[in-house]
């Protein structure tokens, strides 16, 4: 009994994660788009000192940080860093979201093709 359920789970995982090259290209494009929108869509600025501030970028997790210092209205220092934990978790979220979108779009496309084929067949 346990072996049978494991086989069924393995087949289900293979069906979900077995992707074609075309689907992997779509997933890469969507993931890149999600990262870009995440970068420009959410900015949080905080003052970290008297003359310094930090800006954080990314959504749902912040993954990019810019630190800057100002002295008498002169821009003197800027440091950029990637917050790797937030980046990795966002990448997982974006890749899985892209995979779901691709699978749903593929299923809708197949269903619409089947409906059109049935309509053409019934009209004859």
Image (tube, rainbow, N blue to C red):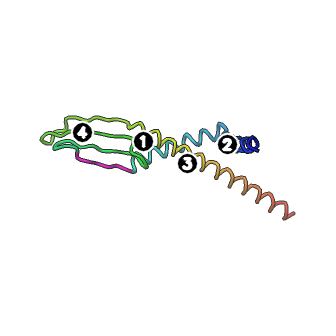
Q: Name the residue: 30% across, 44% down.
A: 55
Look at the picture and state if 54 lies above or below 111: above
Identify residue for label 1. 86
Determine which residue is flagged by label 4: 68
Q: Residues within 10 Å of mark 1 (few under 14, many from 20)?
A: some
- The residue lying furthest to the right in this view is 124
Pair 4/2: label in front: 2
Q: Earlier in the sequence, mark 2 or mark 1?
A: 2
| Cα separation between marks 4 and 3 | 34 Å
Q: Secondary structure at mark 3?
A: helix
Image-quadrant location for residue 113? bottom right
Mark nearer the N terminus (4 vs 3): 4
Residue 54 lies in what quarter of the image? Answer: top left
Marks 4 and 1: CB-CB under 8 Å? no
Looking at the image, tell me whether mark 1 or mark 3 is earlier in sequence order.
Answer: 1
Q: Nearer the viewer, residue 5 or 87?
A: 5
Secondary structure of the residue carrying numbered label 1: helix
Q: Is residue 78 left or right of residue 122?
A: left
The residue labelled by disc 3 is 97
Q: Nearer the viewer, residue 21 or 64?
A: 64
Q: Which residue is mark 2?
A: 13
SS label for mark 4: strand
Q: Mark on residue 26? A: none
Q: Which residues are magenta?
A: 42-47
- The answer to whether marks 4 and 2 mark residues whose Cβ atoms lie closer than 8 Å is no
* For marks 4 and 1 on the same chain, the one whose residue lies earlier in the sequence: 4
x, y percent for residue 123: 84, 65
The reply to whether dot 1 and dot 3 touch (C-beta < 8 Å) is no
Q: Mark 3 near mark 2, Cβ–Cβ under 8 Å?
A: no
């Amino acid at each position: 009994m346990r072996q049978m359920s494991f086989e069924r789970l393995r087949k289900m995982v293979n069906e979900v994660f077995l992707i074609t090259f075309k689907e992997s290209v779509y997933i890469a494009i969507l993931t890149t788009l999600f990262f870009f929108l995440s970068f420009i869509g959410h900015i949080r600025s905080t003052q970290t000192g008297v003359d310094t501030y930090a800006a954080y970028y990314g959504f749902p997790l912040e993954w990019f940080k810019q630190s800057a210092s100002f002295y008498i209205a002169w821009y003197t220092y800027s440091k950029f860093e990637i917050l790797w934990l937030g980046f990795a978790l966002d990448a997982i979220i974006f890749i899985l979201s892209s995979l779901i979108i691709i699978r749903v779009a593929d299923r809708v496309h197949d269903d619409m093709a089947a409906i059109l084929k049935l309509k053409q067949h019934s009209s004859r």
